[in-house]
Image (cartoon, rainbow, N blue to C red):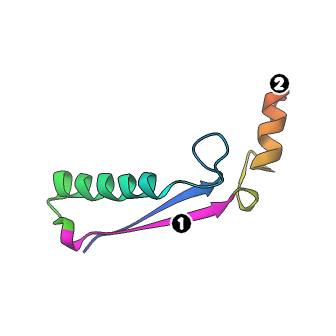
Amino acid sequence: MPIVTIQITREGSGSGRDRATREEKASLIAGVSQLLLDVLNKPLASTFVVIEEVELENWGWGGLPVPEYRKKIAKGGDL
């Protein structure tokens, strides 16, 4: 029984959105489940997919919180 955890940032996938939509999450679940069926022959009924949404300020990159990292990169800063 495969259990797959997908972590995504809670920032949305389009203008004015603050999180992934229900439809986008359903597509992720369907796609990952199908991949496990295709590659490992794991039945859809035995595959569990968990989507964890992480608040943007709760993850970092390049030694900085992501919002600060993105600002620095946008200004042409080096890390």
Type of amino acid at the residue the image marks with label 2? Gly
- 40 displayed left or right of 62: left
In the displayed structure, 32 sits above or below 45; it is: above
Residue annotated with mark 1: 52
Residue 37 belongs to the span the image colors magenta: no
In the figure, residue 40 lies in which quadrant?
bottom left
Instruction: Report the span colored magenta.
Output: 45-55
Image quarter in which the C terminus is found: top right
- 37 displayed left or right of 64: left
Type of amino acid at the residue the image marks with label 1? Glu
Foreground: disc 1 or disc 2: 1
Q: Which mark is residue 76?
A: 2
Q: Position of residue 26 (x, y in %)?
A: 38, 58
Residue 52 belongs to the span the image colors magenta: yes
In the structure shown, which secondary structural element does the residue marked by tag 1 occupy?
strand
In the displayed structure, 28 sits above or below 15; it is: below
In the structure shown, which secondary structural element does the residue marked by tag 2 occupy?
loop
